[in-house]
Image (spheres, rainbow, N blue to C red):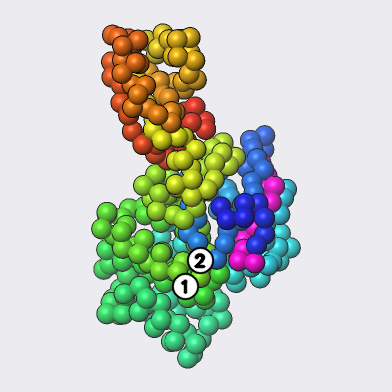
Amino acid sequence: MSDRGQTSSSAVCTVQDLHHHYGEHAALGGIDLTLNSGHVFALLGPNGSGKTTLFRILCTLLPIQQGQVRIGGFDCQHQPLEVRRQIGIVFQAPSLDLKLTIDENIACQGALYGIHGAALRDRRDAVLQQLDLVERRHQPCQMLSGGLKRRVELAKGMLHRPRLLLLDEPSTGLDPKARLKLWDFIRELAEQGTAVLLTTHLLEEADKADEIAIMSQGKLIAEGTPGELRAELGDGLITIEAKDASRVETVLRDQFQLQPQRVHQQVRLRVDSPATLIPELVDALGEDAQSVSLGRPSLEDVFIAKTGQAFTP
């Protein structure tokens, strides 16, 4: 991420050495993050990686056991009310009153933040216009599609003009078209200066973010832009499918002095010049290799390279 681990003039949120335990289980084991204004930041990881715990701490729903979190210049542990004024939240679980209209749901949100009268009308009109909901404002929310409901949730989260918008698995339950539309709005928010943090277990969703932190077992195992993370794996990734993966590993180490990585019955190699190597591998492995394929590194490959495990949402 920009200025990794350092507070910059555009930093909206800084997390330093954050730990959290549930009994003997370490849900977070020393997290450091810097989130800057105008950036979309994705927390990517399988279930149980610590994403939800970190998200709940940033929302001030869990106490800070060890470490420090500051949002908008305020300390989450000692100034939670001030922090809540700096953040907007869209949880994975729906929060709409389905019997109320879009206008009424947003008015209820305004009341929670003390926004009334002309200020409420102006802000409500602005977010409805931004999210293309003006023509539906008088419809009960129970009549809306999943994608439209998600946009109303966004409107609620944006009403008080937060500096940091927190989105928990924002694409859950949305069809592909609705996901694309949602990302248009997320990108527009970032362009206006809002810092956006989203949690996801979807590789293709994380790939759209400006910056990514990959989490596993309560730790950040990789961070950077999607391009930076892939570049760490070289120009290409060779994947060998084998019945006897152990024998293939031995050949690669002894004959080619390579350092393969094994995932189930796959053997993987990160190389800078794969095209010249593949014919030699095919000749040396013979029938031990069921298939040899070459591809550009993906975020899943980054996760596998860092953990030695397949990415399983």
Find the magenta span and give its range: 9-21
- Residue pictured at 37% horizontal, 21% vertical: 277
**Residue 237 marker:** none
- Residue pictured at 46% horizontal, 62% vertical: 90
154 displayed left or right of 67: left
Are there few (<14), some (14-19), or many (20+) residues within 10 Å of tag 1?
few
Amino acid type, label 2: Gly
**Residue 38 marker:** 2
- Residue pictured at 27% horizontal, 80% vertical: 135
Residue 293: % across, % down: 30, 26
Q: Residue 4 versus residue 304: which sits nearer the camera?
A: 4
Residue 19 in the magenta stretch? The answer is: yes
Q: Which residue is mark 1?
A: 192
Are there few (<14), some (14-19), or many (20+) residues within 10 Å of tag 2?
many
Q: Is residue 46 visible?
A: no
**CB contact under 8 Å: marks 1 and 2:** yes
